Amino acid sequence: MNTMYSLTKGALKSSLIVAALVLLPKAYAFEHKHSQFTQILADVVVVSDDKKQTRVNYAKLSANPKALNTYLASLSAVTEQEYKTWSETQQLSFLMNAYNGYTLKLIVDNYADFASGEAKSIRDLGSIFKSPWKKEFFTLLGKKRHLDAIEHGMIREWFAYPRIHAALVCAAVSCPPLRNEAFVADKVVAQLDDQMTLFLSDDSRNTINIKEKSLELSPIFKWYADDFEKGYQGFNKIQDLIQAYEKDIANNPQQVEFLQTQNFAVDYLDYDWRLNDISTF
């Protein structure tokens, strides 16, 4: 009798547990459209008249950072285990948005220094002993991280997408334009191609000097030249990148013909580290 009662009680308990699980809401699923980040970017990123540059309205963003902080908190809530279940493009989009989002936060959290004139560049937020890109000020995939960890330890280490160098924005004027929408898995490859097109077509960052027989590129392509020499996405050297985007770099048929001769030196421009604020338009 006691055994029968015990079995009945156990069966009832199991049934209640199953019923409770059915009634529980579905587990939190990360929103891979990054809709909230797109809303933030659309609100504060200002596009130039020629559509090739952007600046950020940091005063507006710093006055109301709640949405940014909420979005970044959703990134921090993702566990490494969950991240590993995602597709490659979901992972890549997540990390690129994290880099750009936390860069915005670094500026916003220190905006008083920029408003007062004490800081003019993201580099001014570092110290003698630690660059701003080495400051651990957020959590990602369960660990305290800095911006360099995302760019160099994750994105460049885990993915074969050299075009990311036209998408990661460190808040400087000479950086690629900050996109006014989030990167999303189902179109990230096209977004990266568009970013590279914009970046190379902007002759304030990449320019042709026919008289001197030189192509003057952003130093980004010097700093990360090895990422374009590994055969990733068909790039084995910087010249392959130039050939792929020659009609974007050139402003007229004469310049296209000049690039096609391959008879030019590749030089690198100086980098403008001033904050990419709307005041520098």
Image (spheres, rainbow, N blue to C red):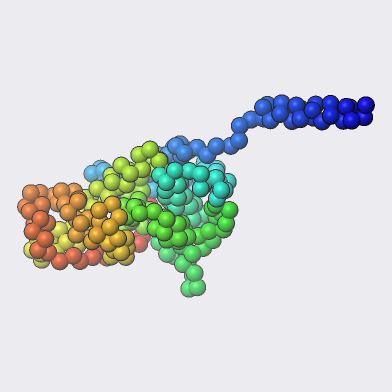
Residue 231 position (above or below residue 68): below
In the rendered view, tell whether residue 90 sits above or below residue 209. Answer: above
In-front residue for pair 229/152: 229
The picture places residue 251, in percent across and down from the top left corner, at 13, 49
Q: Position of residue 225 (x, y in %)?
A: 29, 63
**Above or below, 257 relative to 5:** below
Q: Residue at x 12, y 64 (%)?
A: 264
Residue at (55% x, 50% y) in the render: 80
Whether residue 124 is visible here, answered yes or no, is yes
Which residue reaches farthest right?
Answer: 1
- Position of the N terminus by quadrant: top right
Q: Which residue is painted at 23% across and 61% down in the image?
A: 237
Q: Is residue 119 in view?
A: no
x then y, percent, for residue 255: 10, 54
Judged left or right of residue 28, residue 246 is left
Viewer-closest of 167 and 93: 93
* Vertical relation: 185 (above or below) 100: above
Residue 236 falls left or right of residue 54: left
Q: Percent position (x, y) of residue 150?
A: 46, 56
Q: Residue at x 49, y 64 (%)?
A: 134
What residue occupies the far bottom of the structure in this picture?
128
Which one is in front, 109 or 279? 109
